[in-house]
Image (spheres, rainbow, N blue to C red):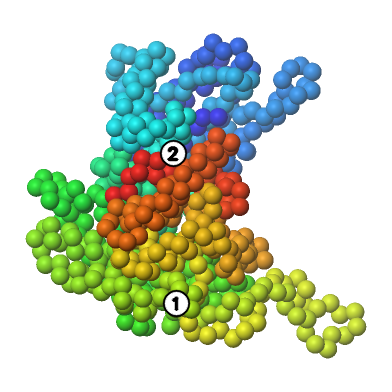
Amino acid sequence: MFYVALDGSGQLEPVLSKTGHRLNAVNGYAAELGNFKLSFPKTSSTTVHKHNYLITHTPGLDQLKEALMSGIRVDAWDKSRRVPYFVLGGQQLTQESADGANLMVFQVTAELPFTMEVMFESGSNFQRSARLQGEVFSNLFNEYVEQFDKKFDEKFGLKAKGFSDSQIEFAKAALSNMVGSVGYFYGASSVQSDYNEEPVPYWNAALYTAVPSRSFFPRGFLWDEGFHNLLISQWDREISKDILSHWLDLMNQEGWIPREQILGPEARARVPAEFVVQRNTNANPPTLILPLQRLIKTMLNSEAEKDKNFLQAVLPRLQTWFQWYNTTQLGTKPFTYRWRGRDATNNRELNPKTLTSGLDDYPRASHPTDDEYHLDLRCWVALAAGLIADIMKSLGTDGSEYAATHAVLTDNGLLDQLHWSEKKQQYSDYGLHTDKVRLEKPKPPPNLQPGQRPPQMNMEKIRVAHADPELGFVNAFGYVSLFPFLLKIIEPTSPKLTRVMTDMHSEKHVWTDFGLRSLGQSTPLYNRYNTEHDPPYWRGAIWINMNYLALSALDHYRKTPGPYRAQAGEIYTQLRDNVINNMYKQYVRTGYIWENYSDKTGEGKGCHPFTGWSALVTLIMAEIYE
């Protein structure tokens, strides 16, 4: 089934065959596209059994499925009527649909193998003598394939690194699906502010963005988009600059950006109600800094006017964004930071989630309080301060305040004082915590009458603490404890660097034959359900974005003078091989790139296809980290 649907004003006109039994084309007009035509040329294939179509009206793009289902009827292969099949019922406009048809669907029932063409033409192309079909299309398409292959080899050089043709095709699939996921969205987020009792609409805004998965997560995520553009910027700097600019233009005057962009009724229909409302007190990792670092590195000494203009446009937004983080996300102790948004009243969760960190159910302090502070957020803020200082220096303005903040937040002595656990010899979060928590069925009330049913029998399990929590370090070893290493804050001469790398390389912690797992096996909440029905997410699975950061850090430390270069180099080679080999193996086995991977078997997990940050495997293969 191939469909065209209008959202809002516009016009669709069907082009039917002389008998009226076949939809040959759809002529249309939309404000965003102008005039266009969608054609379904006839095919000589002998495997086609039926052509059918639907012409109807739908109240919105979020109700296309309902409109389609209401237009289906049952037919049969032959006169015997033994084999039923489902076909579209033609024109089905009612008196209520006075606005006319805004949904047209063309259906082909055929046996495989089967090939056909569907042709979209904009009004600007109508007068051309050669239509883009048949040989004309095939020849032009082949030219673009050659151009793509040439550019891919120039950008990534995988053939020179010894990869096979099949492995290179895998890397091309990752890249092209990432770039192919870039889309345009328009609408308003639903925002809960301290200034309003109920959620209110954000302003209507455009967003040009990649998405993690076109079929499962077809919307923009702030945390994901920074990782997306590490790859996109390597392929096309201008596309990446456009995407990053759109995201920064979603910032309000306070410096807050909604972390999940659910724009328009079609996107809204795909999201559970509890995730729709965005709260302007809650942050998300400012990962846009990562591709901006890469883009800006070549601009800092550039005299090109377009580069200066971009830096001057980006700088005030980054400053406002930074100030928002540096005021709203502060901890109670100087130079500490705390993710907002944890629910201390939720007794259904084994460890209250920290969705705002991007790491969802990763173990934090068991009992959320204002006194806790988080290691990863501190590292993100340090990274942001350094980027702004570099931009201001390039533009000839005084960035000493940001440089000083960066120096304080990257000072290893202060970092160790606030976040180094002497007991466990690791970097850690701090808060009110106990490891002795369990999910248990509530106990029945005392003094039940004989035959009386306990009212709690149908209740979900609740969290029970078997020891009083105490203020101290949260000694879960996993991605969070690696953050000073991942963002290259640990000094290359620090003995703590070799300790972090040694633990990272240990199978009792995060090392596997398939990549670094998110939480060490020795951690009490490793692979534990967070509620009775909520399976582990960031509690053992292998995530490619974090493995990319780890490889980038190892590459940095193996190339930087210091006593631990050899160790970093050895771990780098092993980890890179593990990640690439497993992802390629699972791609060959299943045909997909996955959201995450099992730390036990390497098998793909989560949603698929997931060519968001998992597509960073292309950069890993190319060894592009800066």
User: Which is more toward the observer, 269 or 283?
Assistant: 283
User: Can residue 60 be seen here?
Assistant: no
Above or below residue 10? Residue 383 is below
Q: Tag 1's secondary structure?
A: strand
Q: Residue at x 37, y 19 (%)?
A: 142
User: Can residue 89 be seen here?
Assistant: yes
Instruction: State the separation of the CA atoms marked 2 and 1.
Output: 39 Å
Numbered circles on residues, count: 2
Residue identifier under label 1: 421
- Residue 393, given in percent of the width and then of the height, sits at 13, 61
| Residue placed furthest toward the bottom | 447
User: Which is more toward the observer, 102 or 156?
Assistant: 156
Q: Tag 2's secondary structure?
A: helix
Kind of residue sitting beneath label 1:
Ser
Q: Residues within 10 Å of mark 2 (few under 14, many from 20)?
A: many
| Residue placed furthest toward the right | 450
156 lies left or right of 265: left
- Residue 234, given in percent of the width and then of the height, sits at 30, 42
User: Quadrant of the rendered structure where residue 145 is?
Assistant: top left
Quadrant, the N terminus: top right
Above or below residue 392? Residue 414 is below
- Residue 516, given in percent of the width and then of the height, sits at 49, 55
Q: Residues within 10 Å of mark 1 (few under 14, many from 20)?
A: some
User: Quadrant of the rendered structure where residue 182 is?
Assistant: top left
Kind of residue sitting beneath label 2:
Ala
Above or below residue 590? Residue 551 is below
Residue identifier under label 2: 174
- Residue 241, given in percent of the width and then of the height, sits at 26, 47
